[in-house]
Amino acid sequence: MFPAASSLVPSLRSPQSQNDQHDQSRDRSAGRPSPRPAAKRDAFFDNAKYLAIVLVAMGHTWEPLKGDSRVLTAAYVLVYTFHMPAFIIISGFFSRSFDGSPGKIKRLVTGIVVPYIVFETAYPLLKTYVDGSPQDISLLDPYYLTWFLCALFVWRLTTPIWKLVRHPVPLALGIAMLASATPNIGGDLDLPRVLQFLPFFVLGLNLKPEHFALVRRRSIRIAAVPVFAFALAFSWWAVPRMNSGWLYHRNSAQELGVPWWVGPVMQLALFGCSLLLTACFFSWVPGRTMWFTALGAGTLYGYLMHGLLLKTADYRGWFDHPALHRPLGEIAVTVAVAVAITLLCTKPVRQVLRFVVEPKMDWAFKRDAAELAREREKGEKGDQRQKPDVRERLEQPADVAR
């Protein structure tokens, strides 16, 4: 058994939150209603999201560059083993509160469905007008990066089921193993990838802050160094021996040219390897506020927009330049894409693109009855707090006269 999480985390509240709690108790003792404290973002998760999205962008950039470079291909294989699992685990962790209520469904539509429709339309249009190759628009066939939005929509809708069943992670892993051996699932909504990445989302749903604290211990951070070194060496060895298609989790074993039983075995092995490397990645993520912490709130913007930049570069043939296939060129492109996605996560970009990535769309939804009741209750409480003040002002001249 693991030691108690409380011994690993001295306090889950910041000093500021402790001061807020002291102020609230003082207000209660004075008979004043205490204001509701604003929820503080956890710097660790924002840092993890930002670093994971940078790795995602780097991996997408290496794909057209790796060519015959065994070293770059090994780095590509290593990053692809854990970068999306890490991002999906965090997505599952922050989906724990999803209960199918009207407010959650509204957020699901505005934060996932609308961006999916917009970018599922934008990517084919980009190919049509930049590449000159007509591309059909199909909302049932996710294009390039939009598969993640489609998957997140399905995963989040099924969250109440995973919170209800007795053994959710083994069940999700069993479904993923079956999906890897079933070539007849079809490509609508990129369902094979949705099912094969499902265990990471369900795992995130069942994690608690204490579990992240466990992997952030100093001993784990030190142990992660040889683990990553061995993983990189193994990736270099596996480059000519393994089909990298397994890392995408979108094909069955038969489609990759091997017997059906290899699919479940590879799915189980990759789940273990991805989980180990993801834990090592989380152990290195800083828990304090960094210069890039605020960028963690804009990772969806960076994810969706950097694909447009990379596809434009690909259609224009920029990745075919010989200088980019040399070590210095590969490093330069990697740094450039890291800078680009950093800029795409900044607040100005979020403000400009919020109308398509996180639209409010109040005009499209009915007001929730519970929300209206809360607003009425809040208004009544405000009126009750005002009445004594009015009475005091009316009585004050008489008191002075006496």
Image: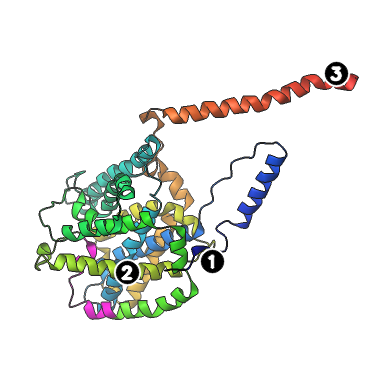
Separation of marks 3 and 1 at Cα, in angstroms: 61 Å
Which of the 4 image quarters holds residue 269? bottom left
* Residue 309 showing in the rendered view: no
222 and 56: which is toward the camera? 222
* Among the two numbered marks 3 and 2 on one chain, the one whose residue lies closer to the N terminus: 2
**Magenta segment:** 234-249
- In the rendering, at what x and y percent does residue 237 appear? 24, 81
**Towards the viewer: 312 or 233:** 233
Q: Which residue is labeled 3 in the image? A: 398
Q: Is residue 196 left or right of residue 280?
A: left
Kindly identify which residue carries mark 2. 79
What type is the residue that disc 3 sits on? Answer: Ala
Front position among marks 3 and 2: 3
Q: Nearer the viewer, residue 208 or 304?
A: 208
State the predominant SS element of the stretch in magenta: helix
Q: Position of residue 169 (x, y in %)?
A: 29, 58
Badge 1 amino acid: Ser
SS type, badge 3: helix
Tell me the residue that label 1 is attached to: 7
Q: Nearer the viewer, mark 1 or mark 2?
A: 1
Q: Nearer the viewer, mark 3 or mark 1?
A: 1
As shown in the figure, which amino acid type bears the numbered disc 2?
A: Val
